[in-house]
């Protein structure tokens, strides 16, 4: 009985170390993925802001041209 417990304890230490290492690597990988996703979301937001500004400028340009083409009454 004592021999079985000793063998189980001897082999359980490396197995626990392997599992711990594996979970650490998974956590680091998830962290890196979250960082990349965050950077992607920042770029998407910047792109959205630039497109919105571009559309606003185009709308202003269209309004200006429309006013310019309207006949003036004096």
Image (cartoon, rainbow, N blue to C red):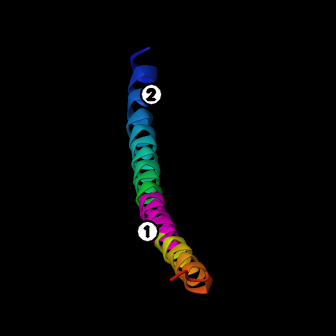
The residues colored magenta run 36-52
Q: Which residue appears at 45% of the width and 27% of the height?
A: 8
Q: Is residue 40 magenta?
A: yes
Q: Nearer the viewer, residue 7 or 66?
A: 66
Q: Nearer the viewer, residue 59 or 69?
A: 69
User: What residue did someone put label 2 on?
Assistant: 8
User: What residue did someone put label 1 on?
Assistant: 46
Residue 39: give x, y in percent of width and height: 42, 64
User: How many marks do you count on the picture?
Assistant: 2
Q: Quadrant of residue 63?
A: bottom right
Query: Residue 57's mark?
Result: none
Residue 24: give x, y in percent of width and height: 39, 48
Judge whether 45 appears above or below 50 on screen.
Answer: above
Q: CA distance from mark 1 to mark 2?
A: 57 Å
Judge whether 47 appears above or below 3 on screen.
Answer: below
Residue 47: give x, y in percent of width and height: 49, 70
Q: Quadrant of the N terminus?
A: top left
Q: Which residue appears at 48% of the width and 59% of the height?
A: 37
Q: Residue furthest top?
A: 1
Q: Is residue 43 magenta?
A: yes
Tag 1 secondary structure? helix
């Amino acid at each position: 009985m004592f021999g079985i417990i000793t063998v189980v304890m001897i082999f359980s230490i490396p197995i626990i170390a392997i599992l711990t290492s594996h979970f650490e690597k998974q956590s680091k990988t998830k962290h890196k993925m979250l960082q990349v996703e965050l950077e992607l979301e920042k770029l998407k937001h910047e792109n959205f802001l630039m497109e919105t500004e571009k559309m606003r400028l185009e709308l202003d340009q269209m309004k200006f041209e429309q006013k310019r083409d309207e006949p003036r009454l004096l």
